[in-house]
Amino acid sequence: MSGRKRKRVTKNQHKSRIRFLTAVGTAVIIGTVLIGGFCMIAGHIFHREPAEVFGALAATKKVEKPEITEELLTPNPYSRPQLELQKVKGVVVHYTANPGTDAEDNRNYFEGLKDSHKTYASSHFIIGLDGTIIQCIPLDEQAYASNKRNVDTISIECCHEEKNGKFNEQTYDSLVRLAAWLCGTYNLKEEGIIRHYDVTGKDCPRYFVKHEKKWTAFKDDVFVYIDEHAIHDENEDTGEKP
């Protein structure tokens, strides 16, 4: 019984097989690296803080304007200098540092500076203990609130009940809505919301300076609110023909 003859492999065929196997192996390695890299990037994105994710998505979204009571200060050099605010690059959060006082009290303090000349101070908005929002300065004018950032920011003063500066629920909720509206109006992202502390190192707003995680959570709440309450811009191009 004769054995089956084995087919002889030439040198060129052997080299071709090696090249083929090398190419396959290289492709497998590259594919593995690419897939792994994609998974790492995706994992990084989906494990980011909510404000980072929503902030990137919400930069061009708008929400409805909250209820605001306009009580503009009398023009004067000490609290309403009527300096032009040309471009808004941020929103600055403050606390009044006057425990137990309300929005009207602090607005009247700013108004009184025209007569007392005690200092230079004001804010675009003041949020009261009951959540009332009072506007003191028009949004095209500078307020005396955030030092070197007066020229390009909108300021928000918040009332508080205790010395620790913690905002109650009504004040906090109005701050979230107001900040969300301003971010949508001026196309601001997460980094556009800052504390007075971030400008000068001042202990303001105290509770958010002492509790960094609460500050981060606040910014999360702002951009989650924007994402959940976004409205269609009537001036936005929908792609439909007139």
Image (cartoon, rainbow, N blue to C red):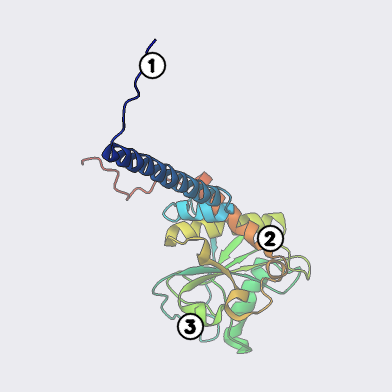
Above or below, 2 against 203 in this view is above
107 sits left or right of 242 in the view = right
Front-most of residues 132 and 185:
185
Determine if residue 131 is in view. no
The residue drawn where x is 34% and y is 21% is 5
Please tell me which of labels 3 and 2 falls first in the chain. 3
Query: On the image, which quarter does residue 121 sit in?
Result: bottom right
Neighbour class for label 1 at 10 Å: few (<14), some, many (≥20)? few
Quick one: 7 or 160, which is closer to the camera? Answer: 7
Question: Horizontal and vertical percent for residue 115?
Answer: 60, 87
Q: Earlier in the sequence, mark 1 or mark 2?
A: 1
At label 3, counting other C-alpha atoms closer than 10 Å, the crowd grade (few under 14, some 14-19, many 20 or more) is: some
Q: CA distance from mark 3 to mark 2?
A: 34 Å
The answer to whether 56 appears left or right of 172 in the picture is left
Q: Which residue occupies the foreground of this view, 98 or 116? A: 98
The percent coordinates of residue 162 (x first, y second) are 78, 67
Q: Amino acid at mark 1?
A: Gly
Q: In the depicted view, which residue is nearer to us: 88 or 66? A: 88
At mark 3, the secondary structure is loop
Q: Which residue is mark 3?
A: 81
